[in-house]
Image (cartoon, rainbow, N blue to C red):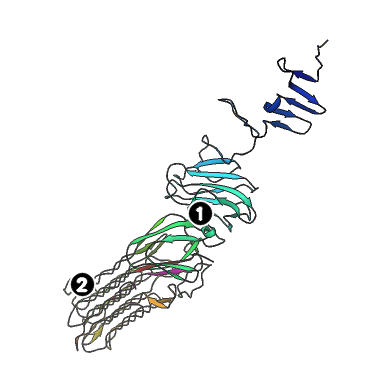
Amino acid sequence: MTSKIKVDNINKVSDDSNIIKKCGTTTTIGSGASNPIVVDGSAITLGRCGGTVALASGATQTGFGRTGTVNWQTGSIKTGTFTAANGEGYFCNTTGGAFTVNLPAGSAGNIVSVQDYNNTFDTNALTITPNGSEKINGGLGSIGLGTEGEGLTLVYIDSTVGWRSIQDSDFATAGSNYIAATGGTETTSGDFKIHTFTGPGSFVVSAGGSPAGSNTVSYVVVGGGAGGGGSEGGGGGGAGGYRESKASTDTYTASPLNATSGPGYNLPVTATTFPITVGGAGSAGPRNSGDNRGGCGTNSIFSTITSAGGGGGGGGSDSSPHRPGNNGGSGGGGGETRGGPGNQGTGGTGNTPPVSPAQGRNGGDGNANAGNPAGAGGGGGATCNGAGGNPSGGGGGGNGATSEINTSPVTRAGGGGGGVYGPAPIGAGGPGGGGDGGRGTPCSGAQGGTANTGGGGGGAGQGPKCGAGGGSGIVIIRYKFQN
């Protein structure tokens, strides 16, 4: 038989005050102002009004709710996309590549933290994506962390604001739905920002945006224009390759070469640094009897987009066997010859290497004429082949492409005009920065391609015997930065 002690109250000997007191369904432990525990049918109360509940040294607590901090998951470093849980903090290691943290469904008071594990967010950014249609900082879409050593804590407030960043001022506004970047010469047109690079630089993206705002860019990338051929009737230099794509969120009038599909369309960016290469101009074809072809332009590069330099113009009649134009973004024009049929130079092939839409066109063939005059072929342009030379004059350079990416219509990547031996009209440079060819009588020198258009240089005439250099390239990037 189990023993029992039945009492309602236990009192102190010294002053007969209650130590344990039962009254109805309520039991109080402690006496007077020191009553620390009250137990009734629906609640347990610890401490008294104005008092303190303390844990002993080394003790732990569970079940008392969040304290405004997270439990850091130091035993599970994240290296790939995962879904976070309320109340947890994660160290994210992006050494192996960028990945995404998916937030849990939000409930008021939920809290999640992330932290760059080993200072690699600037190389491979971390993206944070809300659940379904929930918001971050009052805006729809994801945010990106791209700063070395960055950390962020998010607390879910309500459906109006959603998850609010409370410890990272870089992402404290809804503007993180849009791309944010610096680099080059920066201008704006309405809700769009434009970065123009006329020389090497860096396009530094601090926020990659989201589909709800913007996360892709428009671009025009033009390679360096080639030089015209030298030595009495040189071919015009080919224009630098021209590549363009207008993002689906953009509104400007693009050129006919606008890519509307394929890997170059709707080009995405992340929070990282994109090196920019602006193609240099090809050199003028020299006045000698050896290899006097014009120099080829060099490539312009942004992200995965490369526009090839133009092909140099072929040498004139003093040159053998270097009369053909070179291949390139657009092909160089072929040089002329007075040695009769079969000795003239052929135009170089454009769109080399091939891309779609084609980045440039072919150069025109030079003219063969046993007498005088004889004309060289024009360099290819972005949208048209260079014209062939003939006894009546040099071939004109091919037309460039016109785009309004930087708010007004500008034509770029015109081919250089072919030079002519004798008293015949020169080949005119193609619209878009192509230089005119030179001529013998009356003597006129070849004209260079216009800087930062990728235009080809004009081919040499009879008198000066030197071709002209091409024009350097350009890189233009545009995106929506606000609504």
Q: CA distance from mark 2 to mark 1?
A: 57 Å
Residue 242 inside the magenta-drawn segment:
yes
Q: Residues within 10 Å of mark 1 (few under 14, many from 20)?
A: many
Q: Main secondary structure of the magenta part?
A: loop
Q: Secondary structure at mark 2?
A: loop
Compared across the picture, whether 331 is left or right of 157 comes to left
Nearer to me, 251 or 21: 21
The image position of residue 311, as x and y in percent, is 31, 70
Which stretch did the figure color magenta? 236-248
* Observer able to see residue 108: yes
Compared across the picture, whether 235 is left or right of 259 comes to left
The image position of residue 26, as x and y in percent, is 78, 28
Residue 7 inside the magenta-drawn segment:
no
Q: Which residue is mark 1?
A: 171
For the C terminus, the image quarter is bottom right
**Image vertical order of residue 225 relative to residue 39, above or below:** below
Outermost residue to the front: 15
Q: Residues within 10 Å of mark 2 (few under 14, many from 20)?
A: many
Q: Going 62% across and 45% down the picture, which residue do you hit?
A: 110
Instruction: Indicate the quadrant where residue 302 lies.
Output: bottom left
Q: Going 36% across and 80% down the picture, which residue do you hit?
A: 431
Nearer to me, 60 or 241: 60
For the N terminus, the image quarter is top right
Amino acid on which disc 1 is placed: Phe
Instruction: Indicate the quadrant where residue 356 lies.
Output: bottom left
Q: Going 34% across and 79% down the picture, which residue do you hit?
A: 386
Q: Which residue is mark 2?
A: 292
Q: Are marks 2 and 1 in contact (CB under 8 Å)?
A: no
Q: Secondary structure at mark 1?
A: helix
Amino acid on which disc 2 is placed: Asn
In primary-sequence order, the first of circles 2 and 1 is 1
The image position of residue 361, as x and y in percent, is 38, 74
